[in-house]
Image (cartoon, grey):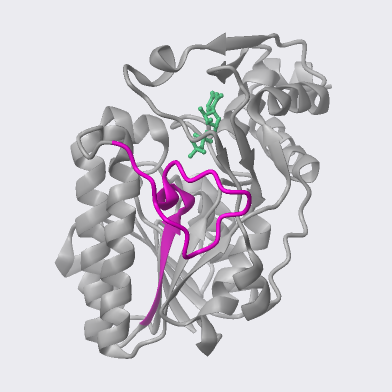
């Protein structure tokens, strides 16, 4: 396949590019480099089947040109991270709404099959024991910018779904549940890399709220091949599919786990939500996927255990850490 990966210099996008190239495909990454980085793609630099195009998904002419060069589109470009969404609500909405519209319309126009990355955030405050794809979404007030990511991604899904139905093109929506791994930065939220960065620097680990909120973290190495397989599976077409891990952990416990695995002397600091995200923030108490749809469609089974994922992040951060961090690591 000749794949276009929007957000290809980002965390999941760069791993997807690696995977596509390793499988013998061609890949073009389209990225505005706002949160993605060239270092995520340095291993592909100069590869004859890989190209990085720097530009925005908001630039429709550019999107048309890039998408026309491929037969498959993976749309991962988005404003991500709770801090980004809360700090830049309008900019985030624009990227997440119009960017997706541009990419999906271009894919349909050029007859390319497409995958749109969505998120467990679309379920909002639904804290069911294993959320299935048909679960109700429970969102807070539409005027709270905290919910704008969930609202925009919900509309993105509709755009993808309606165009998929109308065009008959293979299309898949993946709902990612807290996907983590090497190359992810803690700068914009994302608790696991954040805790690892804090632990390696010997800084306090910032647990928001009481730390009783629970998450299931999934490995990027489990979900990247699943994305490709779903696009190749007709029964998955024009559906939304949960992808993530099944090992649940409370955030306070995660802090202890990271301290143990890094051998850090960091203390845990409990930070009130207001201080972390501003007034009126509503956190999800729990977010646990039911991945049986993906299991039935493609035999999806998360293989990476949380400790192994955390260790892979520690290893990656240590390799790129400044000297005083390396001393702490030894
Ligand atoms: N969190 C935390 N400390 C941090 C960053 C995040 O305690 O420094 C919490 C956050 O409030 C949430 C969980 O960790 O309950 C997961 O946050 P993340 O931003 O990774 O993903 P979310 O599940 O919120 O989309």
Residue at 48% of width from left, 59% of height from top?
A: 175
Q: Could you tell me if residue 65 is visible in this image? A: no
Magenta stretch encompasses residue 53 = no
Using the rendered view, name the quadrant where residue 198 is placed.
Answer: top right
| Above/below status of 198 relative to 17 | above
**Magenta region includes residue 114:** yes
Q: Is residue 87 left or right of residue 72?
A: left
Residue 83, compared with residue 123, is above or below; it is above
Q: Percent from the top left, x then y, of residue 167?
A: 27, 88
Position in image of residue 38 (x %, y %) = 46, 48
* Image quarter in which the C terminus is found: top right
On screen, residue 227 versus residue 219, left or right, reads left
Residue 283 drawn at (x, y percent): 46, 30
Which residue is depicted at the point 29% across and 67% down?
Answer: 158
Is 59 situated left or right of 128 in this image?
Answer: left
Q: Is residue 264 above or below residue 118?
A: above
Along the viewing direction, whichever of 311 and 40 lies nearer the viewer = 311
Depth check: 221 or 30 in front? 221
Q: Quadrant of residue 258?
A: top right
Residue visible at 23% across and 35% down in the picture: 89
In this view of the protein, can residue 303 be seen by the observer?
A: yes
Q: Which residues are magenta?
A: 113-140
Please state the horizontal and vertical placement of residue 207, each as a whole percent of the image. Answer: 59, 19
> In this rendering, would 43 be left or right of 54?
right
* Residue 79, quarter of picture: top left
121 or 23: nearer the viewer = 121
């Amino acid at each position: 396949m000749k794949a276009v990966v929007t957000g290809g210099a980002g965390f999941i996008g760069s791993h997807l590019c690696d995977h596509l190239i390793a499988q013998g495909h061609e890949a073009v990454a389209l990225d505005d480099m706002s949160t993605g980085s060239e270092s995520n793609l340095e291993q592909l630099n100069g590869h004859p089947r890989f190209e990085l195009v720097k530009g925005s998904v908001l630039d429709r002419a550019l999107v048309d040109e890039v998408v026309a060069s491929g037969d498959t589109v993976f749309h991962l470009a988005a404003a991500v991270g709770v801090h980004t969404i809360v700090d830049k609500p309008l900019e985030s909405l624009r990227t997440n709404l119009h960017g997706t519209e541009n990419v999906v319309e271009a894919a349909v126009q050029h007859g390319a099959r497409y995958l749109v990355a969505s998120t467990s955030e679309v379920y909002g405050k639904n804290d069911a024991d294993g959320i299935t794809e048909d679960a109700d979404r429970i969102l807070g007030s539409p005027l709270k910018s905290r919910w704008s990511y969930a609202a925009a991604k919900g509309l993105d899904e509709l755009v993808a779904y309606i165009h998929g139905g109308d065009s008959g093109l293979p299309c898949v929506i993946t709902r990612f549940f807290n996907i983590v791994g090497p190359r992810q930065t803690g700068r914009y939220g994302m608790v696991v890399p954040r805790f690892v960065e804090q632990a390696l620097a010997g800084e306090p680990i910032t647990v928001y709220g009481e730390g009783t909120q629970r998450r299931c973290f999934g490995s990027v190495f489990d979900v990247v091949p699943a994305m490709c397989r779903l696009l190749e599976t007709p029964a998955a077409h024009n559906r939304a599919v949960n992808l993530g891990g099944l090992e649940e952990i409370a955030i306070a416990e995660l802090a202890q786990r990271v301290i143990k695995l890094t051998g850090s002397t960091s203390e845990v600091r409990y930070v009130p939500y207001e201080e972390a995200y501003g007034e009126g923030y509503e956190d999800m108490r729990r977010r646990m996927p039911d991945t049986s749809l993906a299991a039935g469609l493609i035999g999806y089974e998360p293989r990476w255990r949380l400790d192994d994922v955390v260790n892979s992040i520690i290893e990656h951060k240590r390799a790129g850490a400044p000297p005083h961090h390396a001393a702490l690591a030894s």
